[in-house]
Amino acid sequence: MTVSDLAGVEWRKSSRSGAGNDCVELVVGRSGAAVRDSKNAEYGHLAFADIEWGAFVGALKGDLIGTR
């Protein structure tokens, strides 16, 4: 995911984040995903390519557990 992919995007917060601003925000784009700290958004973001993001989400869902 490139910086140009993030132009004009709307960052999403988890519905479980509550009323505060202490959470991680996410945007999924054409070529991957990016995450940032909602209370320090000006510090930048971490970007992941499609394959990296897919592997991460797969691991969370248990798809990759035990495949090493």
Image (cartoon, rainbow, N blue to C red):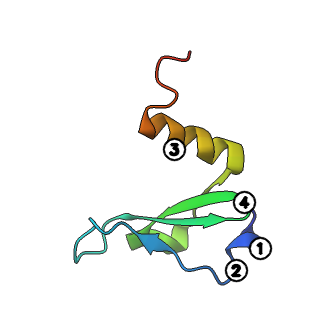
Number of other residues with Cα within 10 Å of mark 3, as a class: few under 14, some 14 to 19, many 20 or more: few
* Spot occupied by residue 25 in the image (x, y as percentages of width and height): 45, 66
Q: Quadrant of the N terminus?
A: bottom right
Mark 3 or mark 4, earlier in chain: 4
Q: CA distance from mark 3 to mark 4?
A: 16 Å
- The residue that disc 3 covers is 57
Q: CA distance from mark 3 to mark 1?
A: 23 Å
Between tags 3 and 4, which lies in front? 3
Q: CA distance from mark 1 to mark 2?
A: 5 Å
Tag 1 near tag 2, CB within 8 Å: yes
Number of other residues with Cα within 10 Å of mark 4, as a class: few under 14, some 14 to 19, many 20 or more: some
Q: CA distance from mark 4 to mark 2?
A: 11 Å
Looking at the picture, does residue 22 appear above or below residue 52? below
Residue kind at label 1, given as amino acid type: Ser
* Spot occupied by residue 32 in the image (x, y as percentages of width and height): 68, 56
Between tags 3 and 1, which lies in front? 3
- The residue that disc 1 covers is 4
Residue kind at label 2, given as amino acid type: Ala
Number of other residues with Cα within 10 Å of mark 1, as a class: few under 14, some 14 to 19, many 20 or more: few
The residue shown at (70%, 80%) is 7
The residue shown at (43%, 39%) is 61
Residue kind at label 3, given as amino acid type: Val
